[in-house]
Amino acid sequence: MKVIVAYSGGLDTSVIVKWVKDVYNAEVIGFCADVGQEEELSGVEEKAIATGATKCYVEDLTEEFARDFIFPMMQANAIYEGNYLLGTSIARPLIGKRLIEIARQEGADAICHGATGKGNDQIRFELTAYALEPNIKVIAPWREWNFTGRMDLVEYAKKNGIPVSTTAKKPYSMDRNLLHISFEGGILEDPWNEFPDEIAVMTKPLSEAADTPEDVIISFEKGIPVAVNGEKLSPANLMRKLNAIGKKHAVGRVDIVENRFVGMKSRGVYETPGGTILHLAHRGLEEITMDREVMHLRDSLVPKYADMVYNGFWYAPEREMLQAAITHSQRYVTGDVRVKLFKGACHVTGRRSEYSLYDEAVASFEGADAYDHKDAAGFIKLNALRLRVRARSKQNEY
């Protein structure tokens, strides 16, 4: 049996390599995806082999992540439950896709992930896997083994000579990528406990934010960001640039209690500086380039789209159908947006586009050539007709 393990080099996956090899009598191949976690990945391959893997793929997926996953999702203005910009959710289908591709390449029988049986990631990985390879076997050790916590893993690692640096549980868990970093568990499990500023990574505390506002201009082509302050950047480098600018101004931190797909509520703190700037700037450009009814229809679908991403249905036909409509809606979302960043806030202060639907002659309070005020009377009366009929009927409640 040959198994492809999603590998990070940390305690959990180091133990998983050895455990899968022994329990399933399997050849284990590791796969470590660089999606912008900013960790030193040199030596990961050697560590996986030392733990029992026959080889380990270590791949930089940051450009694909930004281009094919983050940016299409942001065209939809997707936010889960009004606050969460889906940073962890959107990385999982990419990692799952590469797991399947490597499994095909290696002729593997199964894939394996280290997600727990309580979380959303198990669903995201496995829905992706089954959508792309319906007969693949999935091994999820946290649903199978008898370990109850990380200290059990530490003990197992010691007994089996597995080199791990972790000896005690952190007071929280972290997951970082190009779009955000999440903090969950431990001290954050009590929703009354305040998030400690000292553990923040991608945003400065408000008390340390820059004292001078900063204007940033973001350029879009068909709803996709392509430049910052006139400098054209690759998708991943554009995210890195905005993350650095947003961090300086303490932009993009949210503290929420969300509803997991498995049914429980979970408290998380998310830092998404670049994503927050892009979301607000993109919306600002849409305001002058999108038809009203197209925008309203698209907006009505955003909660459903966000649910699909959060719940792991990236490769489902309903998400692909919506994406096609969203991509079509972005045909004219091309232009520049200026935002002002200051003390945790991001405000749109200017928009311009050659495709703008904003007509100053129509909107202005001055002049009457482009708009006849008298037309409004008939418009209002026609819209009031059913209300007037109801008011004259026995249904009148007022």
Image (spheres, rainbow, N blue to C red):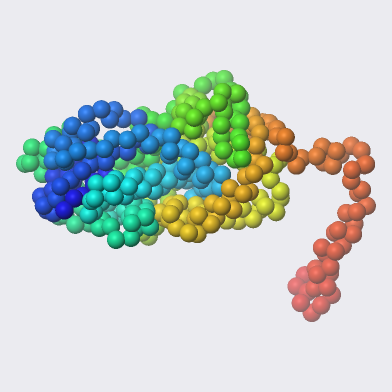
Relative horizontal placement of residue 157, taking residue 98 as reference (left or right): left
> How many numbered circles are shown?
0
Q: Nearer the viewer, residue 85 or 98?
A: 98
Above or below, 206 relative to 172: above
- Residue at the spot 32% in from the left edge and 47% down from the top edge: 101
- Residue at the spot 22% in from the left edge and 38% down from the top edge: 56
* Residue at the limit of the structure toward the top, as seen here: 212
Residue 264, image x, y percentages: 36, 57
Above or below, 339 relative to 279: above
Residue 97, image x, y percentages: 36, 48
Q: Is residue 271 visible?
A: no
- Residue at the spot 37% in from the left edge and 60% down from the top edge: 263
Residue 219, image x, y percentages: 61, 31
- Residue at the spot 67% in from the left edge and 42% down from the top edge: 332
Residue 368, image x, y percentages: 92, 42
Relative horizontal placement of residue 236, taking residue 124 as reference (left or right): right
Q: Nearer the viewer, residue 389 or 179?
A: 179
Relative horizontal placement of residue 391, taking residue 224 as reference (left or right): right
* Residue at the limit of the structure toward the bottom, as seen here: 394
Q: Is residue 135 visible?
A: yes
Identify the image quadrant of the C terminus: bottom right
